[in-house]
Image (cartoon, rainbow, N blue to C red):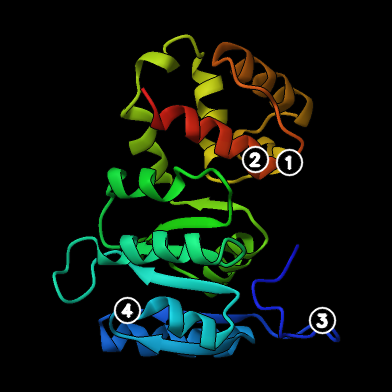
């Protein structure tokens, strides 16, 4: 993976550098402590997204974590900032936090199809392990979506999914969460071979070509769901 900041030398592995944009002081300070506990470097923590491109460039961030609704309007400033960062730094992971399931914002974030993005609900992040796993997955170009967000994306496009069996729908939902075949098998109490057969059927019924990596397969499914 090419690095977005050529000036950083690739000698010894460096701690993951994160920046945080969250207007709630208590939540911001709590997340910074969580990053410290995880061994990350908090390269910046701000209450708004003003001059976000310059801030992230100076911070040399690997992952940017943003609230959806930020000052001054508390509408979609975080999503707008996330999209701006994605355009300026395609290799920086983007993880968006929201209080609510906002499918329009999730679709905007996923529309590029490049991976390295996540959308989590604040109230449903319940453990350090869960959150750091999400951070590291977006850094590695994976896609991380809260299951409720996945449900919203799927329900928004019922017609293309009408040909899927209930089992295939279950597999598709878990794929969209970014889970591996082994993880899907464990969750559904079936074999990995059965998961692979369901995935093949899903791609055939949705006319999607299977890609070589898990996150690209997930993004292909989501890209299909985003467009009429």
51 and 29: which one is in front? 51
* Residue that sits furthest to the top in the current view: 163
Q: Is residue 177 above or below residue 185?
A: below
Can you identify the residue that label 4 sits on? 22
Can you identify the residue that label 1 sits on? 213
Task: Say which quarter of the image contains residue 72.
Answer: bottom left
Q: Are marks 2 and 4 in contact (CB under 8 Å)?
A: no
User: In the figure, is residue 1 to the left or right of 179?
Assistant: right
How far is disc 2 from disc 4 in space, using C-alphas? 29 Å
SS category of the residue bearing label 4: loop
The C terminus lies in quadrant:
top left
How far is disc 1 from disc 4 in space, using C-alphas? 32 Å
Task: Say which quarter of the image contains residue 21.
Answer: bottom left
User: In the rendered structure, which disc, 4 or 3, sits on the residue that comes first in sequence?
Assistant: 3
Q: Are marks 1 and 3 in contact (CB under 8 Å)?
A: no
Residue 203 picture location, percent across and down: 62, 19
SS category of the residue bearing label 2: helix
């Amino acid at each position: 993976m090419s690095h977005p900041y050529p000036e950083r030398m690739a000698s010894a592995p460096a701690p993951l550098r994160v920046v945080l944009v969250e207007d709630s002081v208590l939540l911001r300070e709590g997340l910074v402590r969580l990053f410290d506990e995880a061994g990350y470097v908090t390269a910046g923590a701000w209450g708004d997204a003003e001059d976000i491109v310059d801030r992230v460039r100076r911070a040399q961030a690997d992952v940017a974590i943003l609230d959806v609704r930020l000052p001054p309007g508390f509408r979609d400033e975080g999503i707008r900032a996330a999209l701006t960062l994605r355009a300026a730094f395609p290799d920086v992971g983007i993880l968006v936090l929201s209080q609510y399931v906002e499918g329009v914002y999730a679709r905007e974030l996923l529309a590029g199809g490049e991976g390295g993005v996540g959308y989590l609900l604040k109230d449903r992040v319940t453990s350090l392990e869960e959150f750091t796993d999400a951070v590291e997955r977006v850094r590695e170009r994976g896609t991380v979506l809260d299951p409720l967000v996945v449900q919203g994306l799927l329900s928004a496009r019922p017609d293309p999914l009408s040909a899927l069996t209930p089992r295939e729908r279950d597999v598709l939902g878990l794929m969209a969460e970014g889970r591996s075949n082994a993880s899907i098998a464990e969750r559904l109490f079936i074999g990995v071979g059965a998961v692979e057969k369901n995935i093949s059927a899903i791609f055939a019924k949705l006319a999607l070509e299977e890609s070589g990596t898990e996150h690209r397969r997930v993004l292909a499914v989501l890209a299909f769901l985003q467009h009429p």
